[in-house]
Amino acid sequence: MEATVHATGHVAHRDDEGKRMGMWLFLFTEVLLFGGLFIVYAAYRFINPEDFHTGSQHLDWVIGAINTVILLTSSLTVALSISAIQSGNTKKAKILLYLTLAFALAFLVNKYFEWGGKIHHGLFPGMEEFKHLTHGESLFFVLYFFMTGLHGLHIIAGGIFIGFILYYINKGEVTSESYTLHENAGLYWHLVDVIWIYLFPLFYLII
């Protein structure tokens, strides 16, 4: 725990370790959430291997690979932004965070068009074409839309988190002396990236 003296003379105590611990506990709950979904996926894939393979053929692995590269690059930019803020280079830190947001937007735009294509072909649950799929294929697409959709929401949440970091950098509250919140945003973003690294082969590279 550290103390910071404001201009008013008021002493504010910062519990950086507590903030880090709180973030790790939150990330643990996220791992439990997606870990449970991965177990459900594994069980249904074990029961319906051929149908899951057939369903995977409807997905474009090139788009999935591009999104993987986008997120891996965004992990690099957010990590470099933390190094920049630690060294006191706030301008570089902000540029790198804006680049991270740009990568996040690019990921979501790709996912929008990918989802749009599947919906156009009636593969979204409840649509007419979806009703003609086998039971295993329908399970595949239910899991695909739910898990990638949930991941997309995490991308949006991570982008908002990074937006707050930019706001606090501009206010002078995230600095080379106080950057725990920035680190926590980076940790969250790395988790989002790791989750996609699992989602990509599970849905796009079924053999």
Image: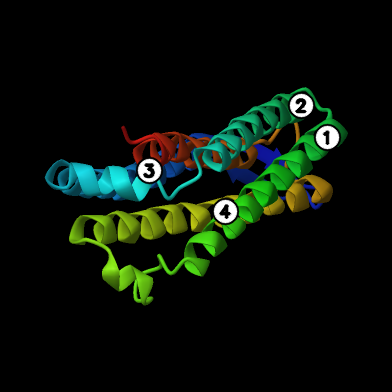
Is tag 4's residue or tag 1's residue first in the polypeptide sequence?
1
Which residue, as the protein is rendered here, is positioned at the far right? 91
10 Å neighbourhood of mark 2: few (<14), some, or many (≥20)?
Answer: many
In 3D space, how far apart are the residues under numbered discs 3 and 2 (Cα atoms)?
36 Å
Is tag 3's residue or tag 1's residue first in the polypeptide sequence?
1
In 3D space, how far apart are the residues under numbered discs 3 and 1 (Cα atoms)?
39 Å
Question: Residue 11: horizontal and vertical position, in percent?
Answer: 67, 46
Question: Residue 88: horizontal and vertical position, in percent?
Answer: 81, 27
Task: Tell us which disc is closer to us: 3 or 1.
Answer: 3
Can residue 52 be seen here? yes
Amino acid carrying label 3: it is Phe
Q: Residue 182 carries which label?
A: none
In 3D space, how far apart are the residues under numbered discs 4 and 3 (Cα atoms)?
14 Å
Is tag 2's residue or tag 1's residue first in the polypeptide sequence?
2
In the structure shown, which secondary structural element does the residue marked by tag 4 occupy? helix
Q: Residue 111 carries which label?
A: 4
Is tag 4's residue or tag 3's residue first in the polypeptide sequence?
4
In the structure shown, which secondary structural element does the residue marked by tag 2 occupy? helix
Question: Above or below — where is 184 with respect to 146?
Answer: above
Q: Which residue is drawn at 32% across and 61% down?
A: 142
Amino acid carrying label 4: it is Lys
In 3D space, how far apart are the residues under numbered discs 2 and 1 (Cα atoms)?
7 Å
Query: Count the marks: how many?
Result: 4
CB within 8 Å, label 3 to label 2: no
| Residue wearing tag 2 | 84
Q: Which residue is drawn at 40% across and 47% down?
A: 26
Question: Residue 108: horizontal and vertical position, in percent?
Answer: 61, 53
| Residue wearing tag 3 | 203
Question: Residue 54: horizontal and vertical position, in percent?
Answer: 31, 47
Amino acid carrying label 1: it is Thr
Q: Residue 90 carries which label?
A: 1
Task: Tell us which disc is closer to us: 2 or 4.
Answer: 4
